[in-house]
Structures are given as structure tokens and as C-alpha cells.
Image (cartoon, rainbow, N blue to C red):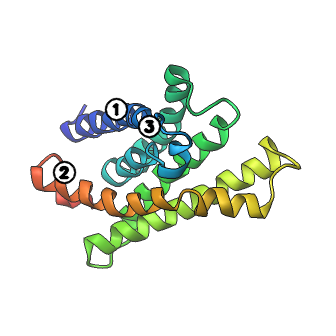
Amino acid sequence: MKENQVKKLVMAAMCVALGIILPMAFHTIQNAGSIFLPMHIPVLICGLLCGWQYGLICGFLTPVLSSLFTGMPPAAILPAMACELAVYGVLTGICIKFIHTGKQLINIYISLTVAMVAGRIVSGILKALIFNVGQYSFKIFITSSFLTCLPGIIIQFIFVPVLVFALQKSGVIGRERI
């Protein structure tokens, strides 16, 4: 295995582990997971730093393993959440590779925005057509996907770029990736 692939594999594994551990701290507060979205942060970072393949795996595995180990997310939410986070990982990886504005911060924000909107749309479609048929409305989609979790979205827009820049400055990842 090439050194770069090993780094990506280790980074992706650390993101999966963080995606399991970080929500445990938030779940001491009722509904904090759906408000602050702690599991999303490591997945978004993985897609940005490791690429779409690792982002896809991280996005799918993180909620599945978290559900197995901690019971969160619950089984009723797990399939839609696994698909949502997989979309996050894939699209952040694809966007960061192909978006070149000349400003790294703008590239990151565009990648995050595209991934978060697309992931929420995929989750909403799955909930409406498969998992919560007849019980899911557009109002519920907007409320749960954009309003309730607004603090989490803001946290993602603040902390993901900060963490990416910190990892670059520390030398953990190179600037050529982003």
C-alpha cells in the first residue's frame, strides 16, 4: 500500500471512530444529536481530506457502527441517516476535487453546502417514499432537515474549515488535497 493510501485509511478510520465517540457526548442532552449533528462533522472532514471513496465508506459505516455499539441512531432512523451521511462523504470528496475557485475556503464552503443540501434531500426522499410513507410531509422535512438542526449546520460551517486548516498546518495532510 502506498504511504498516501495508508494515511487516507488511517484518517478515515479516525473519522469513523470520532463519528461514534463525538455523538456520545451530545446524547447526554435530549435531542442534542438532531440539533447539533455531531456525527456529520467527521464524515464531512473525511470526504474533504480523503476523497469520495473514503467519504462514502465513512459516511455509511459511521452511523451503522454507532447504532451497533451505542444504539444511536435508532434502527428506524439508521437507513436514511446512513444514506444521508454517505452522500455527504461522496459529494464533499467529489466537489473538493473538481471545484477550483482559487480560494481554498470558498472551495470548502461550496463543497460543504452541496453535500449538506444533497444529503438532506436524499434523506427526505427516503423517509417520504420508503421509511415513513404517509407520515412524512414537506413541513416535517423542512423542520427536521433545516430548522431543528440549524445550530448543527452553523457548527459544521465554522468547525469543518477550521479543522481542515489546522490539520494542514500541523502537517497531517498536505495542501495539495484541497
Q: Residue at x 35, y 38 (%)?
A: 15
Circle nearer the N terminus (2, 3): 3
Q: Residue at x 50, y 44 (%)?
A: 32
Which numbered disc, 1 or 3, marks the residue closer to the eye?
3
Q: Position of residue 152 (x, y in %)?
A: 46, 56
Name the mark on residue 167: 2
* Viewer-closest of 85 and 52: 85
Q: Residue at x 28, y 40 (%)?
A: 8
Quadrant in which the C terminus appears = bottom left
Q: Is residue 79 left or right of residue 23?
A: right
Q: Position of residue 19 (x, y in %)?
A: 41, 37
Q: CA distance from mark 2 to mark 1?
A: 16 Å
Of all residues shown, which one is farthest toward the right?
134
Depicted 138 relative to depicted 3: above or below: below
Of all residues shown, which one is farthest toward the front?
29
Circle nearer the N terminus (1, 3): 1
SS assignment at label 3 = helix
Q: Is residue 32 left or right of residue 134?
A: left
Mark 1, other Cα within 10 Å: few <14 / some 14–19 / many ≥20: some
| Residue on which the image places disc 1 | 13
Tell me the amino acid under the disc marked 2.
Leu
Mark 2, other Cα within 10 Å: few <14 / some 14–19 / many ≥20: some
Residue 18 occupies quadrant:
top left
SS assignment at label 2 = helix
Name the mark on residue 23: 3
Q: Position of residue 55 (x, y in %)?
A: 43, 45
Asked if disc 2 and disc 1 are in contact, CB closer than 8 Å, the reply is no
